[in-house]
Amino acid sequence: MDARPDFLLTVENLTVSFDGFKAVDSLSFYVEPNECRVIIGPNGAGKTTVLDLICGRTKATGGKVEFKNQELLKMREDQIVHAGVGRKFQTPTVYEDLTVFENLEISYPKGHGVFGALMFRRDDEVISRIDEIAETVFLEDLLDEQAAFLSHGQKQWLEIGMLLIQDPELLMLDEPVAGMSVAERKQTAELLNRVIKDRSVIVIEHDMKFVEDIATRVTVLHQGKVLSEGSMAHVQADPKVIEVYLGH
Amino acid sequence: MFADYTMGELGAIFAMQGFAGLILFSVFVLMALGLAIIFGQMGVINMAHGEFMILGAYVTYLTSNLFADYLPALFSMYFFLAMILAFFVAGGLGMLVEWALIRHLYKRPLDTLLATWGLSLILQQIYRSVFGAREVGVSIPDWMMGSLPLTDMIEVPINGIFVMVLAVGISLAVYIMMFRSSWGKQVRAVTQNRVMAGAVGINTARTDRLTFGIGCGVAGVAGSAFTMIGSTGPTAGQLYIVDTFLVVVFGGAASLLGTIASAFSISQAQSVMEFFLSGSMAKVLTLLTVVGILMLRPQGLFALKLRK
Amino acid sequence: MSDTPENPKKPMEASRRAVLMGGTAVAASLFAPKFLSASDYPTAAVNTTGLAVTDDEVTIGILHSITGTMAISETGSVQAEKLAIDQINAQGGILGRKIKYIQEDGASDWPTFAEKAKKLLVNDKVASVMGCWTSASRKAVLPVFEQYNGFLYYPTFYEGLEQSPNVIYTGQEATQQIIAGIDWVTQTKGAKSFFLLGSDYIWPRTSNKIARKHIEKLGLKVVGEEYYPLGHTQFNSVINKIRLKKPDVIYAIVVGGSNVAFYKQLKAAGIDMTKEKPLLLTISVTEDEIRGIGGENIVGAYACMKYFQSLDNPNNVAFVEEFKKMWGEDIVIGDVTQAAYLGPWLWKAAVEKAGSFDIDKIREASPGIELTTAPEGYVKVHENHHLWSKTRVGHAKEDGQYEVVFETADLVEPDPFPEGYQ
Amino acid sequence: MLLSKNRFFSTTDLIGFGLLALLIFVVLPIGLDTFRLNLFGKYLTYAFVAIGLVLCWGAGGILSLGQGVFFGLGGYCMAMFLKLEASSPEATKIQSTPGIPDFMDWNQITEIPIWWQPFHSLTFSLIAVILVPVIFAFIIGVAMFRRRVGGVYFAIITQAIAAILTILIIGQQGYTGGVNGITDLRTLKGWDIRTDDAKVLLYFVNGGLLFACLFLAQLIRRSKLGRILIAMRNQEDRVRFSGYDVANFKIFVFCAGAAFAAIGGAMFTLQVGFMSPSFVGIVPSIEMVILCAVGGRLSIIGAVYGALLVNLAKTTFSELFPELWLLGLGGLFIAVVLIFPNGLAGLYSDYIEPRITAIFKRKFPESKDPGKFDPAKTAAEAAE
């Protein structure tokens, strides 16, 4: 079962077990270029773990993850990032002691080695790119603000901005609208709709309305396995899915 | 080096050396149990652990003097009372320290390290002012200081047996407290999820204080027992700190069984190496091995693999 | 090099008489035949190098650890030095001048010792310093004393291998302490094999080296040699090794807290030292240490030193009495404490012999100085700046005191660089 | 110009550097005699360690309890050179083997061991002063940070390393001088380091090197690397998923800290005239952390003041009230954690700086300082 070269991401037989408990069990799925894949599933289905495995945060027990024909499971997190995979965490993860500008600057894809970082110069190109991204994520007026003082929603945006500045080919978002006010949620949906153009995206989300808006395909996970996969309409009609969500 | 000895002698030596290893193991277990509770369960780095042990030793010293002066008839039994007192005095001080110091620092483990180091200096100075700079000689009842001749060659030190029995007893007590009592459930609930534990009605502040107190109390008992084999002076506690931490960390901080397993492996390694090498080199090699293994396996011997 | 004292007996008797006649205990020195008044010794004449000497006062330094791990050991030395200074002052001081002391804390930290030594010499211009305990602290201050030409009285028995023009070593160097003891144990106890044990640092290692050479010279056997880090508290393995090797003598140079652990564990392991099978001979346990170890745990051991509190001579009886009067009844006095007590007296004798406080003149005057009032008996300064003194063996009793079972007939010559032992 | 354009120095930093330079190069040398000046020189050698700790611990969140190891290694490298020079055959003619260091002679070693040989060369020794500790730090760093050992575990393991090295140095006394250390160092290329003139000169060399290190530390802090360190302390995972190999940065800053400590150690040896294992072990290593904490774990300038103040207090208090000193030191540890977690620098920025900047603002109406962050918060976070 060779990975088809036209897939951007190939996940096959991916397995991880924690002390015997298989959180992800022989999982396979494929993501095409420019696809927006939404992963849904009940709590404990292994959604976040899948993202952790792809980006190298958790080491897999078996299987393979290929991205642009590179085996990600053997790579370090930062190498995976450089290969073109960006990851947003469930809770907003920003550098609270730094300003918005500095948060974005650190994510700017240059000067990533130790000495590169030491020699890194904040030139006009960097500044204009940061301004551009800040505008995209609605933070252009807060560049000098310390990240600790941002609202929850603003932190989520900032983290998305930090990913955008890397310009990844595959963007993985873990519950990007969780904990947001209705207004922020709307703004975020708009932001994401803009962001997911020109790249592949994997999103974990519970908000079905939101999922319907953005998903190309939907994968339903249950107990570490794929329960159903297909268009939104397809999975919503799948009796197995209904069983899992409504049954018991 | 064994050519000159008969099989019988060698057997006896190996038996006694094995026994020496077991005594060392018991010593390590006693040292580490209190810390395993405090560091392993609460995540507090208590650098004053050795001073709590010495507090127990001083309590034993005072009790022995008291008995010698007022109850000489019961002197041979004073040690048991001394250990109980040591538990409560060290535990009481522990709870006081938790209230005054530690509770402000639960989110800053590295800062507890500094603060408790400061505490250890203060305690040392207090011991020095109260008991003098010199070591105090704790009189041990005679029946505890002899040895049991098993065969002509094999003699077993009674204080060694005592330390071993104590180690087993306290380990069991701690195990029952942590894993079989409702209090233990509360402690583990608080360590795992403080907010949730608070939400379901556990008095987290009280649980913390009690846990810290019990950890210190166990240290006090250990110190009391160590008057039989070590010295009691203001700075004696500092000698234990590195070994103690290594035992706990090597075992995998959160695991009681790990602490015991690590105490066992470190003590056996050290005891065997001490027999074949010089004492200093044995110590260096033991520490190096532990550090080396920790570098390869930072989570320690026993650690649950968890989703981060 | 050698200058054997002509007749050590006679001055001893003289001093006994002096004590009996004089009201003050440890009163007279041979070099104080008449009352010296400061006016006989004008300051300008006795102090040509700008030391802290006035018409009625002379300042010296006391430099020991008051804090830190060494405070335990050094306290006794400070007490002894203060007692000696008080007694000298009570007798009218030195060249008619009262001794004033400046005490500094070395804090068990070697650079602090060096720093404080420098302060005493450079800022305070002290005429001499009583101080140091560990070899490490002495090594740290030594260059300071040599550079600023100070004069140090060092009280501890030590490893030797040193002979500074700026130090008088009032304790024994290693050969003085070791050789007589080993000779005694082989001759009286018929010992044939030895197990050497020590804390891991220079003094035990050097001492054991000398002991080993001497044992081998006598055609006897060393069956084991072991060192443990300072502060080590687990000795069961080495005790097993001792059982395995069955030596006649355990030669122990364990120090500090390790001491307590070692003797307690030895006893618990069923090695009863009173049975002398094996016999234990130590050079590191004075009466001071026994307080921590507990007399019942070390009873039966032998120690080889130059001084024991139980020494029965009038000098010592008076000394012990005065010491207890000043520092409390329950105090014990160890070998080093006594050696520290000699410091101010030896300095006084040297100053009076030289008729000057100048360091160079004192250095010149020091060799040959005799002290008949020493609690240990008669001592004499050798040209190599160490003391001629007797070596004694004490037998530890349950009450924490030693009973003197042997002393060398003559004073033992100090030999800090022993040929054939290095 | 300097202030706004490249932002190397903020106003605060400029004032801080200026005042410190004034203190070290003008006030102290004028106000103190040679003896006291030498003492301050010794205190300042600890400031090197404290600066390194600000980078490692304050910025990067890596608490090393083994800085004494690097201080000691640097000091020993220097001491080995000086000892060889002091052990000329003429100076050591009373030994049984003249021409070797005295402690080797006492231990029946009859020739200088091979790994001592290169220390005949000053150049080699000076390189070794930095390189030996840095290589050692690199090995520890690679082993630990690659395996993601951090926080408390790192602290305890570095502490164990300090213990191991101390036992080893003491145990191998024939090669290291044992517990006494390497003592009686006299000259550097024939120049007597014990004279008053030499002490004064060494003090200024020490001060110069300290400022060189301060500039380097400032360079690191002001570069993106400095911000990455803070970022790592806040959210290590995020840094990783921004494409950085976090371990490399930790290794770098740990090595930098080691190098600073080593320079301090070498200057210590030169100024004090000996080196011994009592600067390597657990207690001195923890005391070095307190210097940094008292100064303010986030401020390199504060670290220097911390080193000066704590050591000065140690000297003075232990002279006046030896009993109280340990209580005071212990209390200081607790106070620095509970009451003023940002140390002297925190007190300065809370109480003094606002007034000074007010004066400066009147002269140069400046934009706000970009590198500034809320110290109280960061300290709490740093500790997490």
Image (spheres, grey):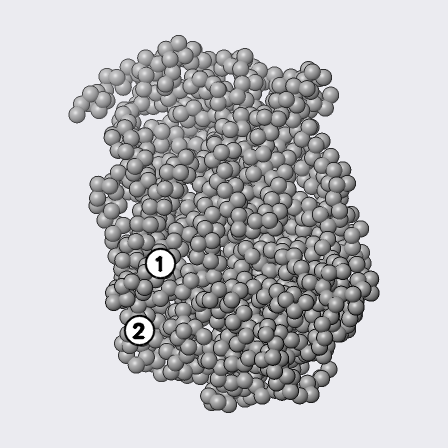
Mark 1 and mark 2 in contact? Answer it, CB < 8 Å: no
Which image quarter: residue B138? Answer: bottom left
Discs 1, 2: same chain: yes
In primary-sequence order, the first of circles 1 and 2 is 1
Other residues around mark 2 within 10 Å, as few (<14) / some (14–19) / many (≥20)? many
Q: Residues within 10 Å of mark 1 (few under 14, many from 20)?
A: some
Q: Dividing the image into 4 quarters, which one contains the N terminus of chain C?
A: bottom right
Judge by depth and name the residue closer to the eye, B171 or C276. C276
Q: Which residue is mark 2?
A: B147
The image position of residue C91, as x and y in percent, is 65, 69
Name the quadrant of the C terminus of chain C. bottom right
Q: Is C359 above or below relative to D338?
A: below
Image position of C41 (left or right of A64): right
Left or right? Give the position of A40 relative to A7.
Answer: left
* Residue at the left extreme, as displayed: A248
- The three-letter code of the residue at mark 2 reads Ser
At horizontal 37% and vertical 38% (from top left) the residue drawn is: B99
| Residue bearing the label numbered 1 | B62
SS at badge 1? helix
Chain name for mark 2: B
Q: CA distance from mark 1 to mark 2?
A: 26 Å
